[in-house]
Image: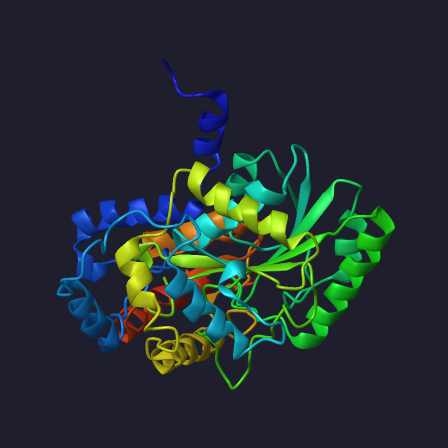
Amino acid sequence: MPASQNIQASIERSSWIRKMFEEGNVRRAKYGAENVFDFSLGNPDLEPPTRFRQVLNELINDPSPRQHAYMPNAGLIETRQAVADYLNKNNRPNFTPDEIVMTVGAGGALNAVLKTILNPGDEVIIPKPYFVEYDFYLDNHQGVPKPVASKDDFSLDFDTISDAVTEKTKAVLIDSPNNPTGKVYQEGELKELAGVLAHYSQKLGEPIYLISDEPYRKIIYDGISVPSIFDLYDESFVVTSFSKDLSLPGERIGYAAANPEMSDKKMIIAGMVLSNRILGYVNAPALMQRAIKFLLEESVDISVYQKRRDKLCDALASLEYDFVRPGGAFYLFPRTPIEDDVAFVAALREENILTVPGRGFGGPGHFRIAYCVSEDVIDRALPGFGKVMKKMKPGR
């Protein structure tokens, strides 16, 4: 039997990121890995902190029984308590383990939240550009993405958000620090967003939720901070993972947290726990749950990413690339000097530089560079970046 029409259509419009990553494998085989400069995939190249290996060794050698048994679908109580304690250091609301669901990464967390809150046809507003997998997650639960334009510096545009609200609006989904732009929304922006959502929630007679996807929360630069949405808006969720700040993307461990002051919280939490099970996750991996409770204050050395950002930004600016300097994450989202971002990315590919067209994130006319690569890769790629800009920039 052939694949469903829906999945065939999804394959056709699937992530540009993976397409470029697969292109990288072809080119590495043809030209040699040392001659291919792959900026396509946000796959952290830093090793996890030393403390992670220490904790893992201790857990593996722990002879206590039933260390790998089934558990409550929300996760181990001691891990959820540790996460709640951690959140209570950085947020005004008072968290308990009951507001935490341990999940299979941030993707698992977001799917659990969406399945809980969405009715068929409900709409979720997403500022562009954004991580395009959100579209597929919404499709999983018969939700409808409503992408809206952001301002030129990628800050929130409240006019476009307000214009997108309908009687079917169920949530606004943000990502800060943002993939693909590295934008960090500041407190003033989030306060204004909270005011917009509160206004329309009252008008519609039911809450419009704010969901913040925050796997890059600790990867920030220049002394800026990521504000707490929990302090600003009661009807809010955070979904996150330890994939980026601990360099553990393959371990698939994260959590969803619901604001303790959310209305109808008891039913929402019950829905998230049930969704975690019936989506097929059952529970987050036991070994990683046991490890994470000891690692909540840890991270990789963020200064390494900042140094790479500065090197890349300074070099590309000297080559006349136009971009907004990112405040966090490990992505740069420059404008392309020609309208066709796919053509520009193709020209870079001929120099064995692999990036991702901006239209893959709802941001045509841009392209994404993932600089979670060594400085040597950046240095050796720069002549190619210069060559392509010289060739493609109008008027040259």
Q: Residue at x 63, y 65 (%)?
A: 154
- State the residue in front, 113 or 68: 68
Is residue 134 at all visible to an observer of this figure? no
Q: Quadrant of the N terminus?
A: top left
Q: Position of residue 325 (x, y in %)?
A: 53, 75
Against 141, residue 265 (above or below) is below
Q: Is residue 103 above or below residue 58?
A: above
Q: Residue furthest front?
A: 65
Give the residue drawn at x 16%, y 63%: 60
Against 98, residue 137 (above or below) is above
Instruction: Residue at the far bottom: name it.
Output: 223
Vertical relation: 380 (above or below) 392:
below
Camera-nearest residue between 117 and 94: 94
Furthest-right residue in this view: 203
x and y percentages locating residue 66 in the rendered image? 22, 53
The answer to which image quadrant residue 114 occupies is top right
Name which residue lies at 45% across and 74% down. 218
Q: Position of residue 56 (x, y in %)?
A: 20, 67
Q: Does 334 sit left or right of 162 as displayed?
A: left
